Image (cartoon, helix red, strand yellow):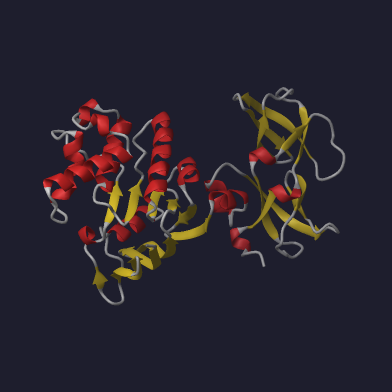
Amino acid sequence: MALVVEGLVKRFGDVAAVDGVSFSIEPGEMVCLLGPSGCGKTTTLRCVAGLETPDAGTIRLDGQVLADGRQGILVPPYRRRFGMVFQSYAVWPHLTVFENVRYPLRFGERLTREEMGRRTRDALRLVRLEEHAERFPHQLSGGQQQRVALARALVMQPAALLFDEPLSNLDAKLREEMRSELADVQGRLKVPALYVTHDQAEAMALATRIAVMHQGRIRQEGTPGAIYRRPADDFVATFLGSTNLLPGVVEAREVSGDVRVRTGAGVLLVKTSAAPETGSQVFVGIRPEHLHVHLQTPAGGAVLAGELVKATFLGPFTDCAVTAGDITLQVQVPGALAARRGDRVYLTVEPDACTLLPQRDGGPLP
């Protein structure tokens, strides 16, 4: 029962909030639309839910066309069989937990009181709230209230789930707990799920696949690990996790096959399948944890000499800033670092830990 979106377009006046977005979600998958405010991710979800009317494109669930701009098909939200969980809990304060969760069943298919009760108890059991069934919302924590909202979405036995930043109102500890809850429930239900968030950690923790959006388009789609290790461009590299982007010029391809790039911090070697021309302007992307700090000049390979300008011990790692040439690099060193601010240090990085990215005005790499 796959959810398929093809060529989705939604305009507000002259602005294309969603500009040709396509993706598919198989049963049991959770796809996260990740991006900054205004990138089009929530508008995409609202089009899928039927809360916005697309200008073009198609939306299908299990082969059924829910929206098709060309054919004028638009199935109303209540007939789309989606369970939705919003940023706002939207629970009724005067109803108990049980009554809140049972409430949507009054407007769907005709069910007996016994069947409504059974479905409600099943939904509460899924989110581990059966012992709180007779409590009122004000007697619950924020995380418990969000689980009520999730149970209310599940009680209709949806064909797919839609999440619109459901954890953003929770504190950091509750967000982490709820991530596990959502992943557990999703794993048991085996339905397609579309999740919208601007939180990188949330997307990395929950998603089967991430679609990074910017200016109404999907810039890159893939598994969290693949996108983190090999971002498609500078926007994806900087939005999904911390990264150092060093502008540089391609000098040559070494005998080893690595590409030599001269940057403002020094010369770097990059392992890449791309074949950029000599003189091409590029970015070299390096994650902070991939840079190694040495207190003496290491032998062999590309070495960046610099000065340690910051070292903050954070327990599992030390967050450092090293100025090399005219560039300041962020570096994460496991554990403590035996160096002080102002010390001379040397940085190395493996060629396969570097990513070669096009500079936007320089065009894509061939």
Using residue 83 as the reference point, say whether residue 20 is left or right of it: right
From what the image shows, is residue 283 above or below residue 305? below
- Asked whether 51 or 249 is in front, the reply is 51
* Residue sitting at the far front: 114
User: What is the total number of numbered labels drawn onto the structure image?
Assistant: 0
**Which quadrant is home to the N terminus?**
bottom left
* Residue sitting at the far bottom: 71
Q: Position of residue 211 (x, y in %)?
A: 47, 55
Using residue 287 as the reference point, say whether residue 275 is left or right of it: right
Q: Quadrant of residue 171?
A: top left
Q: Position of residue 331 (x, y in %)?
A: 66, 35
Using residue 129 as the reference point, say whether residue 364 is left or right of it: right
Q: Position of residue 100 (x, y in %)?
A: 18, 39
**Which quadrant is home to the C terminus?**
bottom right
Residue visible at 36% across and 62% down in the picture: 15
From what the image shows, is residue 141 above or below residue 285? above
From what the image shows, is residue 84 above or below residue 332? below
Would you say residue 102 is visible in this rendering?
Answer: yes
- Asked whether 55 or 362 is in front, the reply is 55
Q: Position of residue 232 (x, y in %)?
A: 59, 57
Residue visible at 23% across and 40% down in the picture: 121
Residue visible at 28% across and 33% down in the picture: 129
Would you say residue 37 is visible in this rendering?
Answer: no
